[in-house]
Image (cartoon, rainbow, N blue to C red):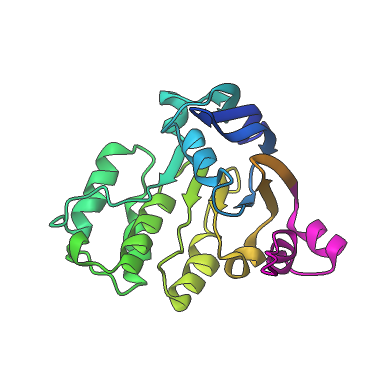
Amino acid sequence: MENILEVKNLCKSYGRKNVLNDISFTIAPGKIVGLLAPNGEGKTTLIKLIAGLITQNSGSITVCGKRIGRESKAIVSYMADRNVFADLTKVKEAIDNYEYFFADFDREKAERFIKQTSISLNDRVGKLSKGKTELLYMMLTLSRKAGLYVLDEPLANVDPAKREYIINTMLKEFNEDSSILISTHLIADVENVLDEVIILSNNKLLIHDTADNIRETNNCSLNEFFKKTFAVNFDV
């Protein structure tokens, strides 16, 4: 089976600022992959390139063999980092919109996810807390039958109890022919479900390896490895 995602020699800059420099990696089907990096090292830029929101300067990206464009967007389920609905929109109307715009949207799954939370179908999106808003978008994103799910800091404002629900229930309930790419700073919360890890440093690919191999080789958790790798020296 072909790779879900292939990134080859990818470069992206904004004016004179180089954000991504010659990035190459592949993601096979059935993988949950963590995208890790300190702030400003290109995680969000890479996510937006894969989602087709911006274009690279050079290199290529393919999703299920399709170059980024209309066909790839139909099989990439991207979790928006902002509210795309009007404040007065009800949750059930948000579901209606996803069902209308995305042919692969599974309404039954979305409603089942929501029933397991404290969110009501009649809640107004604008009245939800930041955590509940993130949870709603996570549920909508993962309710598509996509080839690739792309999540940019999806758990930042979600309380620990809901994080556990997302990780143990939602992230594990996806098609084995699909994959998830999740960018997060909350490594300790998600590392037990990660199959592979991609780490960016100095705008380049530093590591792409299995989570187990990184732990075994370095005799520590992914969270500890990340902290050691990017330790900050405050001595003056």
157 inside magenta stretch: no
User: Which residue is pictured at 55% across the width and 53% down the height?
Assistant: 39
Q: Which residues are magenta?
A: 208-236
Q: Quadrant of the C terminus?
A: bottom right
Which x, y percent locates residue 24? 69, 33
12 on left or right of 30: left
Label count reads 0
User: Which residue is pictured at 74% across the width and 58% down the height?
Assistant: 211
Above/below status of 179 relative to 153: above
Q: Quadrant of the N terminus?
A: top right
Which of the two residues, 7 or 120, is positioned nearer the viewer here?
A: 7
Which x, y percent locates residue 226? 70, 61
Which x, y percent locates residue 92? 21, 57
User: Which residue is pictured at 53% across the width and 53% down the height?
Assistant: 174
Which x, y percent locates residue 143? 40, 52
Above/below status of 163 relative to 75: below
User: Which residue is pictured at 70% across the width and 70% down the height?
Assistant: 235
The image quadrant of residue 17 is: top right
